[in-house]
Amino acid sequence: MILRGTLAIWQRDMLILRRSIFSELLAVVAYPLTMYLAFGIGMQSYIGLVDGTPYGLFIAPGLITMTAVNAAYNESVWSLWFHRRVQFTIESYRVTPISVSEIVIAKICTGFTHGIIKGVAVGVVIFAITPFRFPLEHLFYYLLFLIPASAFFSCAGIISGTVMDKPETIGKVEAVLVMPLIFMSGLFFPLSSYPTDVIPWVKLLPTTALFEGARRALVAGEVQSVYLLQVVLSALFTFIAAVVIFRRKMSE
Amino acid sequence: MRWQLRAVPCMESTETMPAAAIIIRSLTKVYGSLTALDHFDLEVVQGSIFGLLGPNGAGKTTLIRILTTLMRQSSGTAVIEGFDSLRDGREIRRRIGVVSQENSLDRYLTARENLELHARLHGLAKRQYQPRIDHLLELMGLSGRQKDFPDTFSGGMQRRLVIARALVHQPQVLFLDEPTTGLDPQSRRAVWEYIRSLAGSMTIFLTTHYLEEAEQLCDRIAIMDHGRLIALGSTQELKDRLSGATVYEIEFAGQSADQYARLLADMSCVIGISRAERSVTVTLECWECLSEIVTALNGAAIRRISLKERTLEDVFISLTGEKVRE
Ligand SMILES: Nc1ncnc2c1ncn2[C@@H]1O[C@H](COP(=O)(O)OP(=O)(O)O)[C@@H](O)[C@H]1O
Ligand SMILES: [Mg+2]
């Protein structure tokens, strides 16, 4: 079976995740929860409604999305770097009769799974402490965004972890590229806050499509197909790029 | 030259000649401007323990990486168990076990889980690999530690675990890249024992920069430096190759060494001489000269005349003009 290797490596990663699930979840929930308490509750009375939505509710979907995509990206980038450069486990996989694609797909799946699990965990906690409730189908629409988004960021992480050999480069790219992309895409404020001639450019960012689209899906239950298409295509594109780049790196 | 293998076209092995597990033809690897492997030719017979000896930077790892399909050569061919390294990578990887220079163990998995993952990557079913893993852990003396994580292991134990991992799928060819580098002498001997216990059941291809290791373990030895093959043969053949000259150490009783050293130095059959406090070491053209020496030393107070064994180190120095770089 062609994906035997993928399954074996993904299951290995899941075993490691299971072993440390509580500390992982604690660490991953702490950050968005702090933000939620600080901004969503602390600033709520100053900000009031944003586009007709209470501020706490306005930022909640973004915090969940942020947690998921961050977790997917981080898991992928560090895991790939660690297994390639520190532990040399990638090399030990490569001398078995599985293909390089099977390895990279396994790693993409792992990052994706981390994203979904951690996103869901934060979602559960935020919903437990807020009064907001949604119809079930909103949640389903929201997942339509969250799933390709986690895949997209996992693939992006794989690409970073493949091309970057030094840990400090990985840290810099995260500070200069990944975090700004997430924060500038309307996580804490509506896009209408941007100057009018900047808005079309911001809308070109796949992260804008993601955060805007995911919020509308969860809060209003509407799926903006252009946004959704943008996220899905980004995921597909980075998936192909990740596989190609990893394969090329391995044949060096 | 008898230490050179005959150049036989890949597929022409006949009944009388044991089949080749590894055939390397004109293999070349260039990194930028550096030629790490330079038209390398080699054949390794099935079932043998073959040692590739060379100092650091000689190109040993480069060669192993090409043979184990981790890297592509710049030119030339490598055939393992009849499969071409460029075309049939997967078929080769089914049949080989690899112990790389770095341990590459998964420190988040227990010793046993490390082996299990590897077995699964080889497509083995649980009922196949569980008894096999029990056996290997036993063989490598790791049964008692199978539930521990490898970073709690000593260097020697980690190395044995990597060897066990490379054996899970019962490979036909086992590659070991410097299996004992960095180990203390005792662990090194333990690893040698384990490797020796595998002899005959598979082809073993190991690299080392320890002369003693090659001498202790290997049926045949290739010496390489700067990406080139310098010599090839059994340990004995390589030593014999150091010209027909033989070296004797003559130990004198009393203070007479000086006097006889001068006498010996003047003899025509003595081609080299060096002296220590009470002994003289002479290199003779051939062993037949020994009787001439004994005659010349008639009456001297000789305590002992001993034949000095040449070491691989001597071979290496005579071939490359330098000592093995550590
Ligand atoms: N990836 C690489 N890029 C450039 N040069 C390399 C690379 N790997 C090895 N080399 C060089 O090739 C030569 C042979 O290296 P190697 O095969 O590792 O030797 P050995 O294993 O015998 O110590 C060395 O000079 C080394 O510096
Ligand atoms: Mg090496």
Image (spheres, rainbow, N blue to C red):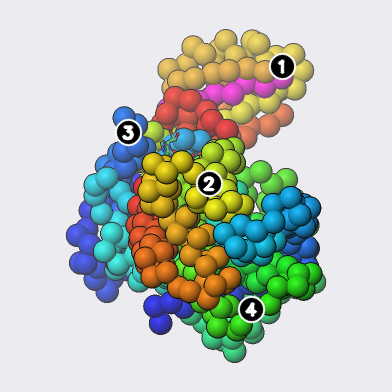
Viewed as shown, does residue B196 lie left or right of A161? right
B278 within the magenta span? yes
**A202 vs B119, nearest the viewer:** A202
Magenta stretch: give its range.
Answer: B277-286
Q: How far apart are marks 4 and 3 (CA)?
A: 61 Å
Q: Nearer the viewer, residue A201 or B34?
A: A201
Q: Is mark 3 within 8 Å of ligand 1?
A: yes
The image shows residue B247 at horizontal and vertical percentages of: 53, 30
Which amino acid, mark 1? Glu
Classify mark 2: helix, strand or loop.
Answer: helix
User: Is residue A210 inside the magenta stretch?
Assistant: no
**Tag on residue B32?**
3
Cα gap from disc 4 to disc 1, whole angstroms: 98 Å
- Do the residues at pointers 4 and 1 share their chain? no
- Contact between marks 4 and 3 (CB within 8 A): the answer is no
Q: What residue type is labelled 4?
A: Phe
Mark 3: secondary structure = loop
Instruction: Return the mark for residue A193.
Output: 2
Q: Earlier in the sequence, mark 2 or mark 4?
A: 4
Are the residues under marks 1 and 3 on the same chain?
Answer: yes
Q: Which amino acid does label 2 sit on?
A: Ser
Instruction: Give the label on residue A134, or none.
Output: 4
Evaluate if marks 4 and 1 touch, with contact meaning CB atoms under 8 Å apart: no
Dot 3 amino acid type = Gly
At a point 57% along the width and 10% down the height, the residue shown is B262
Give the residue pinned by disc 1: B277
Chain bearing tag 2 is A
At mark 1, the secondary structure is loop
Q: Nearer the viewer, mark 1 or mark 3?
A: 3
Mark pair 1, 2: CA separation = 94 Å
Q: What residue do we see at 51% from left, 35% from top? A: B56
User: How many badges with numbers are in the image?
Assistant: 4
